[in-house]
Amino acid sequence: SDMEFQVPERPSAQDWSAHYPAYFRAPADQPADLKRPADGEAEAEAEDEGRQAAQAKRGPGAAAAAADAAGTARVEFADIGCGYGGLLVALAPLYPSTLMVGMEIRTKVVNYLQRRIEALRGFQHALLQRQDKGGVEWVDVRAKLSQEIADLAAPRDPSAPELHDNGETERLVPGHYENIAAMRINCQKYLPNFFEKGQLSKIFILFADPHFKRRKHKARIVSTTMLAEYAYILRPGGVLYTITDVKDLYEWNVKHLDAFPLFERIPDAELDSDPAVPCVVNSTEEGKKVARNKGAKYLACYRRIADPAEP
Ligand code: SAM
């Protein structure tokens, strides 16, 4: 029942510090590794791929310092129905100074993702120890921790087989993974309890459950009511990303979004320069499954436009 959900009365009552401990620590208590050279590598990697994530320039150390001990760090990206977290894991090193949260209704899936993130954070620390000793045995450490991550997933979830064969699919990139977190919530009910008006710059709705039957359409995560909530928590200029392999759901999403006054479609050509888009298309567990089955993927991204009624 709803009693199982931990829902703050209002956004200011939400305590994020347990989700992002590195960002809510007094600067003096922050581990020195928050400023280590691997930050530069994450940037280089992002740039190699022609990606210009503006925020990648600052690095998590800077963000943590800026956030300060008063706990002013704010979540900026939300992944609605994040599942096993592939998007967050891919975005974490691309936007190392941005806090992101995955929101998911299934308890087991949230538990899995929380442990996956903890393991990824542990991976960082192991990597560092090796570097301190002047060694370059990164690969060994990666392999060991990848196995740990795989072990964490037990008992095996048959719906997510690709999570367990690491290497190829789990591309671990140097980065701290301190900026991603997962929480259990029913996004259809409680979003405005977690986020202030205009707090978010990106919302992701990736491969949402299609709810094919007409009488189940009200369970869809895109609806006029839900769009009003997304528009409220998204700042003007912010982006709502949707992708699905179900043409009917794509058409439903586009119909509702086109009709909603506070969203405008971003032309495909403009999306080419958005570093988040390749992650949206390729990095979620569901998206990988669709690719394996050679299914089509329909992408529709919308910008939150300013409300003319508001100055
Ligand atoms: N976005 C992930 C991906 O692309 O791999 C997961 C896609 S999966 C098909 C849809 C996810 O949305 C499921 O994990 C489901 O539990 C979650 N979900 C459905 N309704 C939800 C709700 N009201 N609040 C939070 N999560 C929800």
Image: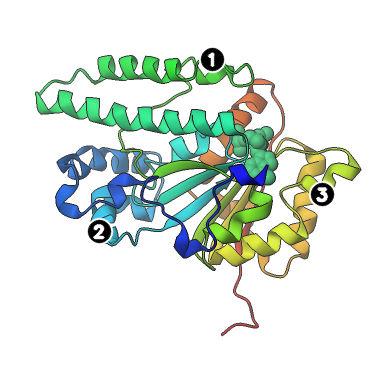
Which of the numbered marks, if any, corresponds to residue 155?
1
Report whether 197 appears left or right of 206.
left
Measured in 3D between alpha carbons, the distance from the residue under mark 3 to the one under mark 1, in whole angstroms, is 33 Å
Identify the residue position indicated by label 2 in the image. Answer: 69
* Element class at badge 1: loop
289 or 13, which is in the foreground? 13
Report whether 61 appears left or right of 79.
left
User: As shown in the figure, which amino acid type bears the numbered disc 1?
Assistant: Pro
Marks counted in the figure total 3
Q: Quadrant of residue 213?
A: top right
Q: Are marks 1 and 2 in contact (CB under 8 Å)?
A: no
Q: Residue furthest right?
A: 214
User: As shown in the figure, which amino acid type bears the numbered disc 3?
Assistant: Lys
Label 3 CA crowd tier, 10 Å (few <14, some 14–19, many 20+): few
Residue 284 can be seen in this image: no
Measured in 3D between alpha carbons, the distance from the residue under mark 2 to the one under mark 3, in whole angstroms, is 42 Å
Give me the residue at 44% from left, 55% from top.
75
Report whether 86 appears left or right of 30.
right
Q: Is residue 190 above or below residue 182?
A: below
Identify the residue position indicated by label 3 in the image. Answer: 218
36 or 152, which is in the foreground? 152
Give me the residue at 29% from left, 55% from top.
63
